[in-house]
Amino acid sequence: MVAVEVANRSGIEVEEDAAVAFAREVLAGEGVEEGELGLHFVGPEEMRELKRDHLGVDEVTDVLSFPIDARERVEAGVPRQLGDAILCPQVVGEQWRGPLVHGLLHLLGWDHATAAQTREMTRLTLAALALSGVKPAARRL
């Protein structure tokens, strides 16, 4: 099972248990059954600071990902460190599942630097949402 450490610094109540269960479901769908994941909920100002400090863009966003092992080979007996997915509930609102999938895909090494990569990430996001019975929001996937 993927161990998930949750931290909510957003200042608002979030569906932590649902987010953990959904993250595990998405990761299992991508073939990741074991590992460790950090799932953080932060407010807009902290999200803005993280994006500015790590990406050089001074704006708030819905999700950021900080991968560690991705799909790299890890030694036997060593838990896979997936990294941290950070969501801003004030930005994602009730439509948090799409941004969470997006962030998890980044932790697994997916990117959207090219049009082909963007199409593949969108396809994977829609597939994960469909498997969970979630209708995607009109916002960015």
Image (cartoon, rainbow, N blue to C red):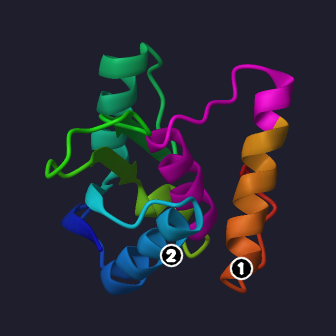
Give the x, y percent position of residue 18.
42, 84
Residue 14 appears anywhere in the view? no
The residue at the point 84 percent across, 39 percent down is 119
Range covered by the magenta-colored residues: 97-118
Q: Position of residue 139 (x, y in %)?
A: 75, 55
100 and 13: which is toward the camera: 100
The residue indicated by pointer 1 is 131
Quadrant of res 127:
bottom right
Mark 1 residue element: helix
Residue at (30% x, 34% y) in the render: 68
Disc number at residue 72? none
| Relative horizontal placement of residue 138, taking residue 132 as reference (left or right) | right
> Dot 2: few (<14), some (14–19), or many (≥20) neighbours within 10 Å?
some
Quarter placement of the N terminus: bottom left
Find residue 33 and report its horizontal and vertical position in percent. Answer: 39, 67
Residue type at mark 2 is Glu
Look at the magenta stretch and give its main secondary structure. Answer: helix
Q: How many labels does the image show?
A: 2
In this rendering, would 63 be left or right of 29?
Answer: left
Residue 105 percent location from the top left of the image:
55, 47
> Foreground residue, 34 or 55?
34
Extreme-top residue of the structure: 56
Earlier-in-chain disc, 1 versus 2: 2
Give the alpha-carbon distance from disc 1 to disc 2, as whole Å: 9 Å
Q: Which residue is drawn at 59% across and 68% down?
A: 29
Q: Quadrant of residue 98 in the image?
A: bottom right
Disc 2 target residue: 25
**Could you tell me if residue 15 is visible in this image?**
yes
Task: In this rendered view, identify the residue nearer to me: 41 or 129.
Answer: 129
